Amino acid sequence: MNRHLLTAVLLSGLVVLLVVATEALGVRVFDRIATNLCVSLVLVIGLQIFMGNSGILSFAHIGFMGVGAYVSALLTIPAQMKGMALPDLYPILQGIQVSPYLAIALAGVAAAVVAAVMSYPLMRLSDAAAVITSFALLVVLHTVMTNWSNVTNGPRTLFGVPKATDLLLAAGVAVAAIVGAVAFKESRTGLLLRASRDDEVAAAALGAHIPHLRWRAFIVAAFFAGVGGALWGHFVTSFSPNAFYLHQTFVILGMLVIGGANTVTGAVVGAFLVTGAFESLRSVEARLNDLKLFNDQVVGLTEIVLALAMIAVLILRPGGLFPSREIGAVLARAFANKKKGAA
Amino acid sequence: MTFALQFLIDVLSLGGAYALMALGLVIVYGILRLVNFAYGELIMVTGYALFLAGGTGLPWLVMAAMAILVAVATGILTEYVAFRPVRAKSVTAVLITSFAFSTLLQNAALLFISPRPRNVPLPPIFSQTVEIAGVVTPMRNLLTIAAAAILLAVFAFLMRRTVLGVAMRAAASNFTMARMLGVPANLVITSAFAISGLLAGVVGILWIGRIGTVVPGIGMEPLLVAFIATVIGGMRSLSGAVLGGFLLAFIDTTLNYTLAQDLLKFRDAFTFGLVILILLWRPQGLLKGPATGQRT
Amino acid sequence: MLEVKDLEVRYGAIRAVRGVSMKAEAGQLVALLGANGAGKSSTLMCVAGALRAAAGSIRLMGEDVTSARPEAMVRKGVATVTETRDVFPDLTVSENLLLGSYVHRHDRAGVAADRERMLQLFPRLGERAGQAAGTLSGGEQQMLVIARAMMTRPKLLLLDEPSLGLAPAIVDQIFEMIRVLKSSGLTIVLVEQNVSKALQLADTAYVMRLGRIAAAGTAAEIAATTDLGALYLGG
Ligand SMILES: Nc1ncnc2c1ncn2[C@@H]1O[C@H](COP(=O)(O)OP(=O)(O)O)[C@@H](O)[C@H]1O
Ligand SMILES: [Mg+2]
């Protein structure tokens, strides 16, 4: 079997396994955790599509998650709810109500369109200028979400988003994201972009217009961010702009860095590991809070551990757990070696 | 006339604070070409150190000096934890470690102190007002102007008149060449982080003096301010950062006086949109920084 | 004085220098010649400690300095003048010279004397002492970086294409300076495109091609036996 196909199948298999195990256990908490994990997968894989192929750190990703969440909410909150949830909504939007599934797809498209319009000129920047502009983009998106009360309810929580995301839907989208990311990586755009990451001059000599390639990756990444945001919105049903800011950026970036930004395998493994660690630590935090050992609530422990893990990984294994080879390639090579040994 | 004076005091006091914030960020960026995302936390740490020192009953100036020392120490710690081990690896790695370290410090404050605002001890002068030529203005604005003026002057003097200062300016324009003349890389880098901490400590006290309380997220706004001012000021130029700080204060103050309230909310979107436009137009920043140089 | 053995320098996958061995005896001037991209600068920067050696060894006066950092090399008596003529453009001429004496900064009288000597050797720098180095002409910048390197009190001076892009009259002045420095007993490794001028001053010479030493010998031998035209045009 082709090793790229093998990678896609194995990683998707991991998601299927997660679904089967969760359904078999039938515990509601696990169902919530597994669904969140699948949403995270969509977001991390989206970020991997841009960062892994272009080699450029982007802070804007979670901003597009917010765009997706709000767009999908606007398209699906029932008309009679809208009066309460968004009292200042523009009349044109008041009557609109589409199926959540259509809305989730449209949310991805909307995020991609916003990304396409805003980012094209940014793609020729590199180094600090690229990082600061992407950070600035996040701040701009956040400020707009926080203050455009007509469509977002401002800094306050937006209620009434219909529940539509369940484990199966989230897992299905996660599998689609995995297949999409592997396909993008091996597409002509992905190959040229990765060549440019290692050697801009050589890639340009191959006829690659690097900013344009980066732009494509950025748009695809924003699409998945938008879809991920919408999925999440239809899962939690109420949220505020703070959900789409530095904390979420930190978590998603942590997953990618720990797993390995250059590979889809890294993104998937990172999401699984960090989610697992987060949930265990959360329960420790909750246990500590129940014991009332401290005056205040115990908060922040999970983030501290994740931050330490990120720093440790970057020091000891800068490429993450899967720095360059996808799981398919790793196994294919191991298999080939074994055959050689047997012969 | 009174309006002009009022405006001037506002711009100078805000600009003084902004200039110090930007200078603290750019001193590290200029030498290492690396953005320190944990910079805002140096200000947070200053606030909490002052809060904790509040229980000791020491004279306020001693407590303030201790708080600034804590900021210096944290600046140096940032270098050892987030920069030195990954410095040689990749630019992205350092950006991420400093971002992670920033989150680490914020959450340590959440965990070990509290998510709720904490009052810091401040001498009465911070809440007094004075009248100058018919303009009533808080004393702390004048304090900020004075502190910024003194610190900027001392800083300029040290950077011009001491060998280490000259060496740091040289390292900011060409680190490798400075090393090839015998300037030790580690000394320059550690000094840069220590100075960054010192500036953050002083501006932290002035900044927190405006509000009187400290929360874990207090470093965010200074970080953003420093980013914008640095970008305006040319990214690598120390004097540019100072100028950028005052320019940003001028823009902000003008917007405050002119923008309608419901547009004012979008001020950050405006200023950051401006940052993006500036970087597109001139990726090296608006004002010219020192000529070429490379990272090691 | 300097002994390089089987040196290899890499930029990622590119092997810019492979198996280079060379020697410089005390008081000698060694010319390092070769076409653009032959690996001369890489060799020099590696000796200076600014590039890491992927393999091989570098010995300075018997001591192994293969993995020494650039700031340590200066203290051991190696000064470098880079091809890119790296003055600190925003610093004044005086400040640039001051940095040259960074290692000796506590010896104030000595530093003042060094500075006097350099200003005598390069009077133009004295006239421009308070001016930002970035505003100097190319020739003046070249003088400044040589003077600055001499302020470190080197035993071994590495010069990378000091005549690059300068007017012929200035080039003559620079070569005259190099002759004066050599006659003071300094050991010099000189990378030059101006082959005939370099060979006039040199004791021994090495010719590099595609990262390797293609020929070595006394300056006279190299001048006589090597087809220098082919070397530069044919790469
Ligand atoms: N920073 C660098 N990154 C990648 N390749 C480099 C770099 N510097 C030099 N090279 C390559 O190394 C080889 C030798 O270069 P160099 O040492 O500058 O040669 P020379 O000084 O003889 O002209 C060339 O092929 C050049 O392209
Ligand atoms: Mg060269």
Image (cartoon, rainbow, N blue to C red):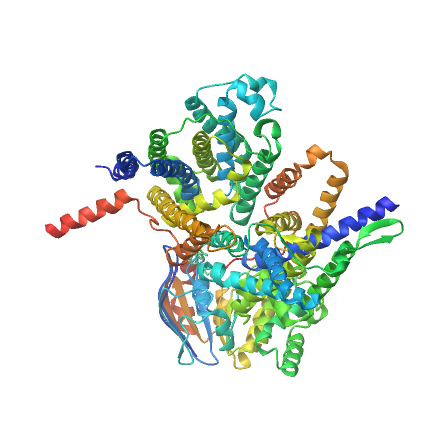
In the rendered view, would you say A291 is above or below B65? above
Q: Which residue is drawn at 65% across and 72% down?
A: C122
Q: Residue at x 58, y 66 (%)?
A: B191
Q: Decide which of B27, B11 is in the foreground and name it.
A: B11
Provide residue A44's location: percent of width, then percent of height. Answer: 41, 40
Quarter residue B187 falls in: bottom right
Provide residue A64's location: percent of width, then percent of height. Answer: 50, 35
In the rendered view, would you say A102 is above or below B68? above
In the rendered view, would you say A112 is above or below B194? above
Is B48 left, or right, of C22 in this rendering?
Answer: right
Quarter residue B153 falls in: bottom right
Q: Which residue is drawn at 39% across and 55% down?
A: A313
Provide residue B293's location: percent of width, then percent of height. Answer: 56, 57
Is C23 left, or right, of B139 in this rendering?
Answer: left
The reply to whether residue B232 is in sight is yes
Provide residue A52's location: percent of width, then percent of height. Answer: 40, 43
Q: Decide which of A337, C48 is in the foreground and name it.
A: A337
The reply to whether residue C166 is in sight is no
